[in-house]
Amino acid sequence: MADTQRPLSPHMGIYKWQVQMVTSILHRATGIALSVGTLLVLWGVFSLAHGEDSYNQFRTCVGSPIGLVLLFGWSWALFYHLCNGIRHLLQDGGMGYAIPQFVRSSWLSIIVSIVLTVVVWAYVLTSGGAA
Amino acid sequence: MSTNNHSAHDVRSELRNPLKRARGLGSAQSGVGHWWTQRVTAAALVFLAIWFVLTVLGALHADYATARSIVAKPWNALLLVAFVLAVCWHAVLGLQVVIEDYVHTRWKEVVLLVLVKFIAVLGTLATLMAVLRVALGA
């Protein structure tokens, strides 16, 4: 991608795997995914303003197998970005910078985001299925 | 800024114009504005995202009329507009950092940065209009 001649930072391969690395990368990846997912929210609101046929079409698309897989992915991305975002806000306030705390909060973000995703989809499935 | 106290190791403060330091805008000319706005929208989105998820879960099996009446409620209309506004703003700032980090060809970088802003502004305005149409029953 670069057409400049300056040195680039080392490739990822030379670093030892650490959970803080994963949370950092995931925060970016889920942020990009959620930016795209916002278009789904916009589509839903537009369809609601446009009329019943558009709204039903939107519901059919979202409720289709591909729609549900995407929705599941986006729901986890939202919960992960939310949990890890709160973690970053606390760190911006100067909290949790000791290495053991850093590792623990990283795992906490990942685990809580998975728990929230499971809870939400369990609710969706027990309340009569999606869409 | 008396010259008596200045030793050789403090040469930086002599080379920098005092006005530049007072303004605190740095080389990007925008200071900590980007960083700060990213955090403020993040704090707003903590609450708005939870509201959004709960509202969507409450509208799971809503038919057209029900879904419309949910969005038309004044509080929901207001929070939905606030949510989309905060999301788009936060996304523009976040995507900007990603683009600046990974796209090293200047013209591609600028085109992407502007494109993201255009899409975000259009999306926000269109959502605002759609929510108003639903809320005002047009």
Image (tube, coloured by chain):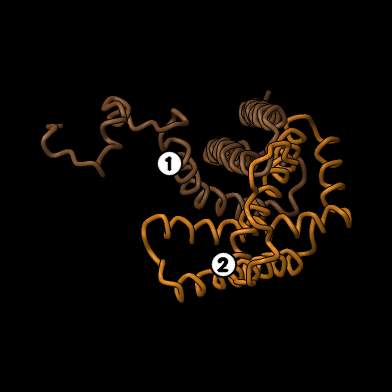
Mark 1 and 2 residues: CB-CB less than 8 Å, in contact? no
Where does the image place residue B99, in percent across and percent down from the top left?
A: 65, 40
Q: Position of residue A33 (x, y in %)?
A: 71, 49
Can you identify the residue that label 2 sits on? A20
Chain drawn brown, letter? B
Label 1 resides on the chain identified as: B
For residue A68, what is the image quadrant?
Answer: bottom right
Residue nearer the viewer, A19 or A117: A19
Kindly indicate the quadrant of the structure image that contains residue B113.
top right
On-image quarter of the N terminus of chain B:
top left
- The answer to which of B56 and B102 lies nearer the viewer is B102
User: Label 2: chain?
Assistant: A
Q: Amino acid at mark 2?
A: Gln
| Residue for badge 1 | B36
Q: Is B120 or B23 nearer to us in this picture?
A: B23
**CA distance for labels 1 and 2:** 23 Å
Mark 1, other Cα within 10 Å: few <14 / some 14–19 / many ≥20: few
Q: Is residue A92 left or right of residue B137?
A: left
Q: Residues within 10 Å of mark 2 (few under 14, many from 20)?
A: some
Considering depth in this image, is B136 or B49 the residue closer to the camera?
B49
> Which structural element holds mark 1?
helix
Q: Colour of chain A?
A: orange
